[in-house]
Image (cartoon, helix red, strand yellow):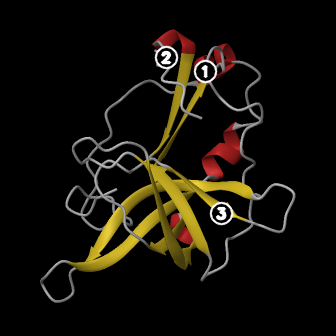
Amino acid sequence: MATGKSVVVRRDDRAIFLDLSRDTAAILLNRGDLPLPGSPLPFVQEGKAVKIGVEIGWLGFPAIPNASLCFFAGIVSGHVPSQNAYLVDGAAINGVSGGSAFHLFPTEANPVYLMGVLSAYVPNRSTGEMLPGLSVVRLIEQFHELAPTFASVDQAREAEPPAEPPSPKPEGESLGDTPSKRGG
């Protein structure tokens, strides 16, 4: 739905919850005048994994001149429960991180489900060259936890942790978490 409408959401009108261990952030705000569909995409059921070998899609704004919102797709290659992540055989370039990832269930009543967010691209450097790698899609567990928690943005703002810059992590602490590995 292209509306051309821009909305500024000021600090007092939103709450942000960072989850560094999952490489996700949740921004809670009032719907207000945002041009959103009548009902949001449903989440993939909590605790239910998307099967290996299925195709998923994601949206993002690649960091290329004059690029607009783009659709990407890939095949789920692996599930890493300890990292709350899927490894996906599909392209993710700078600017696409944070894009919504979704799974299509063409036989169900709601055919599109929100499953995660694109987190990073991890290139294969086993030969010293940069070879095709895998995209990392983080699960939406943080959203499953936060969605039923707050009745209002004011309540969320009261629980919002203080804003602090993240501390640097050592190389290799988690999938795609270092600037040299980030690509999405």
Local secondary structure at mark 3: strand
Contact (Cβ within 8 Å) of mark 2 with mark 1: yes
* Amino acid residing under circle 3: His
Is residue 173 something one can see in this rendering?
Answer: no
Q: Secondary structure at mark 2?
A: loop
**Residue depicted at x 47% and y 14%:** 11
- The quarter of the picture where the C terminus appears is bottom left
For the N terminus, the quadrant is top right
- For disc 2, the marked residue is 7
| Point 74% across, 64% down: residue | 47
Residue furthest bottom in the image: 127
Q: Callout 3 environment at 10 Å: few (<14), some (14 to 19), or many (20+)? A: many
Q: Which element type, helix, strand or loop, lies under badge 1?
A: loop
Using the numbered discs, state the Cα–Cα distance from disc 2 to disc 1 in whole angstroms: 7 Å
Question: Mark 2 is on which residue type?
Answer: Val
Q: Which percent across, then down, holds residue 135? A: 41, 68
Residue 98 locus on image (x, y percent): 44, 47
Query: Any mark on residue 103, and which?
Result: 3
- Residue visible at 48% across and 51% down? 59
The residue identified by callout 1 is: 34
Q: Which one is nearer the viewer's eye here, 18 or 110?
A: 110
